[in-house]
Image: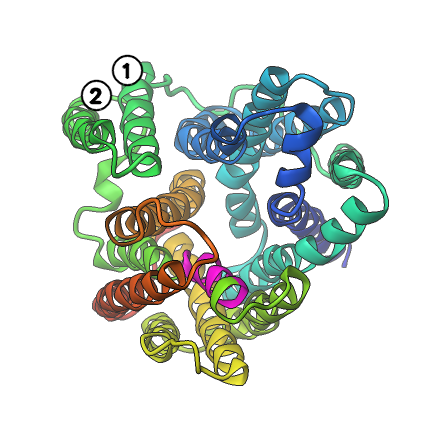
Amino acid sequence: MSNIRENFVILAIVSLTSFTISFAGSSLNLAIPIMQIDLQADSPTMSWFVTIYILATAMFQIPFAKLSDIFDRKLIYLLGLFIFSMSCVVIIFCKNISLLLLLRFLQGFGGALTYATGTAILANTFSPEIKGKIFGINISSVYFGLTTGPVVGGLIVSYFSWRGIFVVISLLGVLSSILILLKVDINLEKISGERFDFLGALFYTLTLIALLYGFRILPKTVGYILIGSSILFSVFFIFWESKVANPLIQLSIFKNNRFFTFANLSSITYYASVSAIAFLINLFLQNVKNLSPQVVGFILLSRPLSQALVAPFGGLLSDRVEHRILTTIGTILGALSLLFFLFLNANTPIYLILLSLMLGGIGFGLFSSPNTNSIMSGVGRKYYNTASALIGTMRTIGQTISMGIVTIVFAILIGKEQVGTAIYNSKLIESTNILFTIFLGISIVASIFSFLRGKQFNVHND
């Protein structure tokens, strides 16, 4: 009984951390304009507030997943949570934009360490028979963070200041850190005889920086150059990893492992197809429908709220039903929601948009927990950390590709058209219809990848 209690304490701590980090991201979106005025920062500089966090989380997940193979993953998790929390504490008193960006980078770095190890800790703690249920609960905490973030963040900014958001985040982070220290055993000894692959980590980092930043600055020429460079770096990375004795990523986990490989491919493509939905619908509702930001915020809440409610159910089902059935149904529902969005125009009723958002949220809830279960079930225990980090990395890359596509289409069709004009609204509708057509195509690819993973199989947990 005590072991069961201790295991669920670990679930509570990891879920609290997941909630905190997702809450931090969604609540700060509303605070950025006010932060810009308070810190007297220009728009390009302030855009780095978002970009530098994403880059940091993507860069460090895989390298620190490997380090957690060498050292205790719980130690790496605690270190990440401590760095994340302390950077938030310092930001409360920060008055310099350059220091703020540095602290934001550290925040992403800390978040990366928790992403890299959190799911692995849960997979290693709970038996295979209930892992889907456990992943569903943890993923649900992420969506509740995304759901409550805009509402709570908006209230804090309205009645206090943007710094108040970091006070709340800091308190939650410190609480999680204390709980880990009190309730979770940390092994300070080296637990693996492997060496860290520094050159592989360098190639990996260069690949992601070039890829993610390249997509961020599209359609500038240097953006395409960076994306091309990322392909070159990735070739060097794969070549090196196939030769080195202790690689950063053991490429053999993909070889002859269709279940694991296609679970990752479906993840990156599905995130690429749905991540820009909230951004596009937000622009459409505020500009074309002329709704207030508060009303739009409540409409957009329907999607993450649906995800949060369905994710535990999807996880529970994945312990009993074939993964590819659930994930493929989830991606098909996501595709149907995108199909409805293809025909957006000035006369589209709000209730149809709301229903489409909810349908997409239900689909994503059915996809995310079983797909996480697939990725973690597709490898043995020794690769849990790498698989855990890949979940976060696929998500980040998919989200970046999604917004990169939006940037390209907007640059071509809308250009520098002034916001608020009839011409802008017309071009926004045209751009949105084209984008949802593209995303529908990507979601169909995700459905195919999801189904191609094949039936589940048991992996020896050595």
Above or below, 56 against 459 in this view is above
Residue at image location 52% in from the left, 24% down from the top: 71
Q: Which residue is mark 1?
A: 199
Figure disc tally: 2
Part of the protein shown in magenta = 275-286
Mark sitting earlier along the chain (2/1): 1
Q: Which residue is mark 2?
A: 244
**Residue at the right extreme of this rendering:** 159
Q: In this view of the protein, which residue sits in the foreground, 296 or 115?
A: 296
Figure quadrant of residue 32: top right
Marks 2 and 1, Cα distance to the nearest angstrom? Answer: 10 Å
Q: Nearer the viewer, mark 2 or mark 1?
A: 1
Residue at image location 52% in from the left, 61% down from the top: 131
The amino acid at mark 2 is Val
Q: Are marks 2 and 1 in contact (CB under 8 Å)?
A: yes
In this rendering, does residue 120 appear at all?
yes
Q: In this view of the protein, which residue sits in the foreground, 48 or 14?
A: 48
Q: Quadrant of the C terminus?
A: top left
The majority secondary structure of the magenta stretch comes to: helix
Asked if residue 220 lies left or right of residue 232, the reply is right
Q: In this view of the protein, which residue sits in the foreground, 393 or 239?
A: 393
Residue 191's x, y, as percent?
Answer: 50, 24
Instruction: Count residues near mark 1 (Cα–Cα under 10 Å), then give few for <14, some for 14-19, many for 20+.
Output: some
Residue 280 counted in the magenta span = yes
The amino acid at mark 1 is Leu
Identify the image's colour scheme: rainbow, by chain, secondary structure or one colour.
rainbow
